[in-house]
Structure formats: structure tokens, C-alpha cells
Image: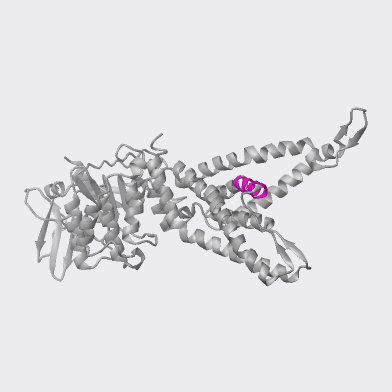
Amino acid sequence: MKSQFDFHRFIQLLKLELFQSRKGIAMILVITFGALFFIGFLLSLFIERPATYDHTESFGGALMLGGFIVSSLAFSGIDRKLRRIGFLMLPVSSLERFICAWLLTCIGWLLAFSVGFAIYVMIANPIGQMLFPDTAFKGFNPFGSVGLLTMKVYAVLQGIFLVGAAKFRGYVFPKTMVVIISVLTVCGFVIFFALKEEFTSDHYCTVTGECELVDAFALHSVYSVAKVLFWYVLAPLTWVIAYFGLKDQEA
Amino acid sequence: MYAYGSKKPLFEELQLQLQEGNIYGLLGKNGAGKSTLLKIISGLLSPNSGEVQVLGYHPNDRNPDFLNQVFLLTEEFDLPSLTIEQYVKYYGAFYPLFEGSLLDQYLLEFKLTRSLKINDLSYGQKKKFLLSFGLATNCKLLILDEPTNGLDIPSKSLFRKVVASAMTEDRTFIISTHQVRDMEGLIDPIIIVDEGEVILNQSMDEVAQKLKVIKSSKVPNEDVAIYWEGNFGSYAAVELNEDNSETNIGLELLFNAVTANKERIHEIFQQS
């Protein structure tokens, strides 16, 4: 087991990856917050006043987009011919490499982005207030209930981009997006045609015996299955696929 | 056996055993399969069939305990944007036997300092740094692919000195090159590969016992000479050493003789 996971070696790998990606992560954070500020500024020019601006959507959007790009770069050393040799000859196991990538792109990104976002809100709100006095800029706590839910969604979906990073060589982010869109389209069609009958005939009945057609998606039994699959199956499944994909690439 | 896609398979029926305590010279023309063999040994390529064992491990398992005993210096490389000091701090930690003082010794020999940025170094200086780092890892197996390419003449002799001084009985060095003159006096035994097969794997002593070189101003007798070459009216011929004479057959001449006359050389070394 020690040959597969050695704590000392793992910490060294973590230090190395953190050190090497420090500039890249800082750049992504600066670009993300710069873009958020710029887009917020543009939107403020066109919205009707008085208005209220809250950061919930920008937090979610930027966290996901930035994190998916960072995750797509997780194993970038494996897809370039010359860098690949150094990558493969480094005395670490695939397991250590995978856990390290997951820690940095999932937990690391969540923490770095959330702290960065909290600082961004503290800076952006007074500036926005100064520029647009008739707009109320609401504070945002990334570690509040909405923020935490967004983080949970990111933690689940991020695994898909780790799979992309392990499976594709080059242009990982766009390739992964194409695959996601294609799979979702196919799944959408299949689910629609396979479950059409159930969706249009599913009823709920009261104790008095009165029955009505279920018209809210969340009330269908399929939804509960999908929910379980999303929260408990998708992430571990993508981690396993990403790990074996990485092993395959290294072989 | 290894095959690149649908190309002709390389190293079919290869049986090769390397003993520690030697600096093996892997010689061959461009495209002969030298780099492929090195990649198989270091685990970068997996053979399609057959078994490879290095230091008791299967290289393509990529076991970290194997990888921390092997250092591969390739002909081309991509180094991170770090100073030598930072590189040593972050990469040296992966090699349990890494010795900083040994590295400083080699860096001093090559006139490099830890404060230098790796990306500001010339190609030759990068090679010197990587060689120093590789030797300082105290790895059991050091693999150098075309190490003297890009080195100036004084650096080549310094390279030979440094490599020879780092050799110990429990280490194995494999140096692949097609610049055979640079390796004269350093590599022994010699492995020559051609068209994906090992056509010679002998120590220089064994070579000297079987072959001799005759220099003359006359064109050598083709019935006796296994191989000969002329240069401005003087000729060097490789012949069977039937009278046990002590001659020094240079690497370049040996390489040319072996690649030009594979079957004959194979027969000679088969007779023990």
C-alpha cells in the first residue's frame, strides 16, 4: 500500500503542485474577479433604478466556470510530449497524483475562490455604491446556505472535468463541454421518450380518494432517483473514472 | 517486443541482461531503436509482449519505489520555470537518497550556482544541471540519452570525468549516443542496436579478445578483414584476433564494423 500512497511523498507532491500552479491560479482569480467587476459595471449602466444587486449568481457562475477550467488543467503535464517525460518519471503513484489534483481543484479552489470572493465583495460593493448611488449592493457570505449549496454542486460536477483532464490530450475544457452537451442531449431525448408516459399519467391521490395529475417535476419518483444519483453517485463515479483514466494515460 | 502502431516490431526475441557496476554504452544509428529501448527500460513504454524487469520491478507498473531509483536524462526536455534552488527543494524531496552536498560539488564542476534560473540557462547548461541533479539523487540506474549533444568540447571531457567519478559498484549507467567518439574510454560494455535488434553486447575486453585492428598504408585483404576503412591513404582494418594481439579498437571503428557486417560479428561472438 505504501508504494501506492505515502503521506510524505503526497505532501511533497502537494507542495510542488501548489508552487508550480501558484501563478496560474492567481491569474485565474484576478481575471475572474476583474471580469465580474467589469460585467457588473456594464450591467449597472443598463438596469432600471432604483435597483438591488446581489452577488449570488455571479458567485455561482464564476465559481463553476473558473473551477472547471482549473480542473481541466489538472493533469496538463501528461498531454505535452516533452513535459510528459518529466511528469511520468516523477516518483509518485497515480493515486497520489489523483488525490492531489482533486484536493487542489476541488477543495483548494473552493476555499481560494470563496475567500477571494468575500474580499472582492468587500471591495466591489463600496466602489459600486460610489459609482451608482441609487443601487443597493447587498453583501454576500460565500459560506452562507446559498454559497454552501453552490459549493456542493461544484464539488459534484467538478469530477466530470477531472475525467476530461485524465482522458483528453489538449483542449480539455472545450472537449469536455462538447461531451457533456452531447450526453445531456442524448439522455434528455431518451428520458423524455422512455418516461413520457409516466410523466403524463403520474397522479397523486388524497385520503378522500380524489386524484390529480402530478404537474410539478420535483414530485415525480424519477426526480428522487435523479437526485440520489446526482448527489451520491455522480461524484464518486467520476473520481473512479478519472483515476483509472489517469492510470491508463500513464501506462 | 515493441511496435509503434503498424510499423515493423522492434526487439523481437530480445534477451538482454545488464549487470550493475557498469557504464553501458548504447550505440546505434538514428532510428535504430535506442530511445525506444531506453523508454522501455524506464517504463515510459510498455512492451507489447515479453517481460522487462529493472531493479526487481516491472518498469511499466510505475511504482514510485522504482522511479525514485531511476533517473532519465532525455535528449530534449521541458523544465519548469524555477531557480535551481527551487527545483532542488521541490524535486529533490522525491528521491530518498538525494544529497545536496553532492549536487553542489557537481554544480561547482560545471560552473553553475543554485541561484540561477533554469530557463535562463543554455541548452548545454540545462543538461549539466540535470546530470548533476540525476547524479545527486544517488539513483541505482542512470539513463542518459545523447548526453553530449549540445555540450562544447571542454564540457564533453568534464562530462566524462564527472560520470566516471560517480560510478559505484551498485549503480548502473546506460548512455545512449550516436556520437561514439565522445564516449571513448567511458563506456564499457558496448551494446549496439540496429533496426530494432541488439547486434552486439560485449565488454571492451571481450571485443579486444575476438577482434583486432590493423593499420597499414595498403588496401587490406578483403578475405581477412571483417571490415576496413580508408582515410587519405591509410587504412584501418578489423580482423579476427587469432594471435591474441593487444590492439585498441576504437568505438567508431567497432561500431562501423559491427553495423556493416552483422552476421559475421554475430558468428564471431557466438563462438565462446
For the N terminus of chain A, the quadrant is top left
Q: Position of residue B149 (x, y in %)?
A: 28, 63
Q: Nearer the viewer, residue A48 or A218?
A: A48
Magenta stretch, residue numbers: A145-155
Give whichever of A239, A23 is nearer the camera: A23
**Residue A192 makes an appearance in the image:** yes
Residue in the foreground of this view, choosing between B176 and A110: A110
* Residue A236 highlighted magenta (yes or no): no
- In the rendering, at what x and y percent does residue B70 appear? 31, 46
Indicate whether B71 appears above or below B15.
Answer: below
Residue B131 coordinates in the image, percent (x, y) = 27, 56
The chosen color scheme is one colour
- Using the image, determine if residue B206 lies above or below residue A56: above
* Residue in front for this viewpoint, A250 or A156: A156
Is residue B30 in view from this perspective? no
- Residue at 9% x, 48% y: name it: B242
- Give the side of residue B112 with respect to residue B119, left or right: left
Instruction: Give residue A84's quadrant in the image.
Output: bottom left
